[in-house]
Amino acid sequence: MTVLDSRALNRATLARQLLLDRAEIPVPDAVAHLGGLQAQEPQEPFVGLWSRLRAFDPAVLSHLLTERHVVRTHLMRRTVHLVVADDAVAWRSRHDAMLRQRVLGVYRGELNGVDLDELAVAARKVLADGEPRSMPEIGRALAERWPSAGPRALGEMAVALLPLIQLPPRGVWRAKGGVRHVLLSAWLGREVDPSTREGSDPVGTVLVRRYLTAFGPAATADLRAWCGLAGLPAAVAEMRDELVTFRDERGRKLIDLPDAPRPDPETPAPVRFLPAFDNAILGYDDRSRIIDDAHRLLSVAGERVVLVDGRVAATWTVEAGTVTVNPLTNLSRADRAAVEEQGRALALFLSDDESDRVRVASSPR
């Protein structure tokens, strides 16, 4: 079985994630190709797409959100993702059990004795009038029926039990807005699809293909780390005749789509600035293909990072129009110049004026 080293996996990831070459594809196609963008920080997807698409216009993504072509909703790993509407409809039911269990993992004590089916019915009645509501408002309404559980636990569980979306202006470019929920069916005018049919897991096999398209080659543990779902190894087994297999340097079995890009490991990789919680890093259990183990915690701490030669080599912040880069390792003169060039371009993208201010720290943090 062919062994793919870390550099080969890195270049495959960059190619699949549209980070090797900026793509010339429509914004909704990019969102769909990536399987959505993690978006609990509402402005971060704009940077993620700027780093991946040529001539990205943030107004296009804002328009897609307000016109209901993309939505913000809880899906993979019970985190807020920006996904195309079709994927929200197709995938939501497959995530139901995971969403419920993750809330119970935090609030099992508070929700002890609460019938979750009854809670779902009651929460749907609260939202049935179509008026947007915050999670605390939903929780307080439900606490009238279950006062001992407390509004926080009830609100969190209601959001897990029901297919809801977060309304704009939350997630619109340079707009501020609190989190307000409405039923997905009310916003899109259609109900979510059932997740399974007897003897098959059609959504599971779709998720496997879509994951490998954007993240492969990968192990089944990586697949689960991306979506948080159990049961997908059965979908992988159902697809075994469609897949090719490799091993990584740690001996893990990797699966992939036969015709997916696996570039030459020596393919040059340009500097790229990634937003907080980017799935190019979080979409794997073994993230060593893109970030050193010593820096792994940066990926879950909300640090924005810079890729140099395809790997996390710095963090970045922006304040008052200035992009500040803090290296994690010593940068060569050429790499430093490339970071400064991309940093200036990012500063222009993020700025309200024509400034292009960038500062690169002189030594690793």
Image: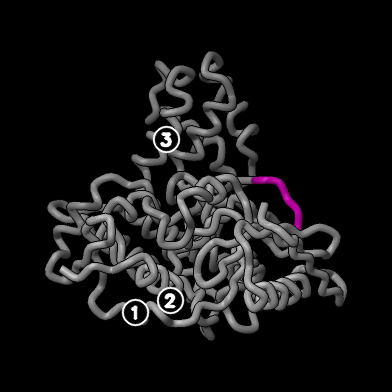
Q: Residue furthest top?
A: 148
Disc 3 marks which residue?
102
Q: Amino acid at mark 2?
A: Ala
Instruction: State which tag comes first along the sequence, 1 or 3.
Output: 3
Tell me if residue 175 is in the magenta stretch: yes
Question: Looking at the picture, does residue 82 appear above or below residue 34?
Answer: above
Q: How far is disc 3 from disc 2 in space, using C-alphas? A: 32 Å
Q: Residue 15: which numbered mark, if any? A: 2
Residue at left offset 85%, top offset 60%: 320
Residue at left offset 33%, top offset 50%: 224
Whether residue 243 is visible to the viewer of this picture, yes or no, is no
Q: Quadrant of residue 53?
A: bottom right
Kindly state the secondary structure of the residue where label 1 is placed. Answer: loop
Kindly state the secondary structure of the residue where label 3 is placed. Answer: helix
Instruction: State which tag comes first along the sequence, 1 or 2.
Output: 2
Q: Residue 261: which numbered mark, if any? A: 1
* Front residue of 65 and 109: 109
Where residue 285 appears, as percent x and y from the top left, is: 37, 51
Q: Amino acid at mark 1?
A: Pro
Task: Tell me the magenta residue range.
Answer: 174-179
